[in-house]
Amino acid sequence: RRRVINMEREKMRAREATLRAQTAEAESRAIKAENARKTHELEEARALQLSMLPKQLPQVSHLDIAVHMQTATEVGGDYYDFRIDDHGHLTVVVGDATGHGLNAGMMVSVIKSLFIADVFNGDHRSFLKKCSHTIRQLQLGNLYMAMTLVKIINNELIVSAAGMPPAYVYRAKSKNIEEVLIKGMPLGAVANYDYQDRRITLQDGDTILLLTDGLPEMSNEHKQMFDYHRVEDVFKHSADKPAQQVIDRLVEAGRQWRPHANPNDDVTFVVIKIKAQQVE
């Protein structure tokens, strides 16, 4: 009888072990399926983000333009765009959406639509206000959009910003850097915010750098940030080069700072150089 009882106990243990194995296998399949779903969602968000970007750079006779955007492993929502009006004046927008994945992609698509529909009115402050109002009306929670908006009219630069890093202007004559910092809340954060703009006179050879916070806030293996003074230093020592070479120097500086890993946020630059022969 004792032998029979022991056999029954062994059978019970075997059934329990089988059930545990089946449960573990089911849980593993569920985790793999969830990971696959999340990966697919991030791939969709990345594809949406990239589809919002211009397919080619604008051609303006007196401007040398280059851009760079490297998305992080997790989609962050950087955005840039260009428009040329009927007078040949260039408008550039550089944005950085809060949040990640599909939410960031959705924010970029909202801004892209507004930019296409409204940019030709030429009033930066009204455009930023309209964007902010639209985002608030959509009630997206804690999703906002930081943005720099610039327009170049012959030898004048008009700059507006909403919660973005400074723009930088390299003066070819003095070889100095001017920081253009315009304080402003991200779009969607505050109702009826009064956004500001600045007008700056440009000279032949001057170079403009617009960027998101991806490079200055990039951390290395020691948890140190690249910071804005290093951005300014790299820019100053390369700004006399063609626009693409300026981009290359900035990208290389980021790679050296974080050599063994992808950026921890999207990294975006737009560089615009005023050519020696302007067309008025």
Image: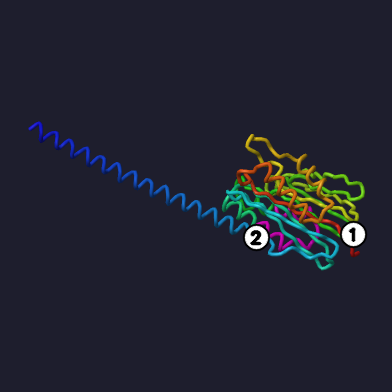
Q: Is residue 69 left or right of residue 276?
A: left
At a point 83% along the width and 63% down the height, the residue shown is 89
In the picture, the disc for residue 276 is 1
Q: Is residue 29 left or right of residue 117?
A: left
Which quarter of the image is occupied by the C terminus?
A: bottom right
| Start-end of magenta stretch | 110-131
The residues tagged by marks 1 and 2 sit, at their Cα atoms, a distance apart of 32 Å
- Measured as percent of width and height from the top left, residue 4 is found at 10, 35
Give the residue number, with chain letter if any, for mark 2: 52
Q: Decide whether residue 167 is among the magenta residues.
A: no
Q: Main secondary structure of the magenta part?
A: helix
First reached walking from the N terminus: tag 1 or tag 2: 2
The residue type indicated by label 2 comes to: Met
Seen from the viewer's position, the closer of residues 43 and 233 is 233
At a point 55% along the width and 56% down the height, the residue shown is 43
Q: How many marks?
A: 2
Above or below: residue 223 compared with residue 215: above
Above or below: residue 48 compared with residue 21: below
The nearer-to-camera label among 1 and 2 is 1
Task: Give the residue at the far top of this rendering.
Answer: 2
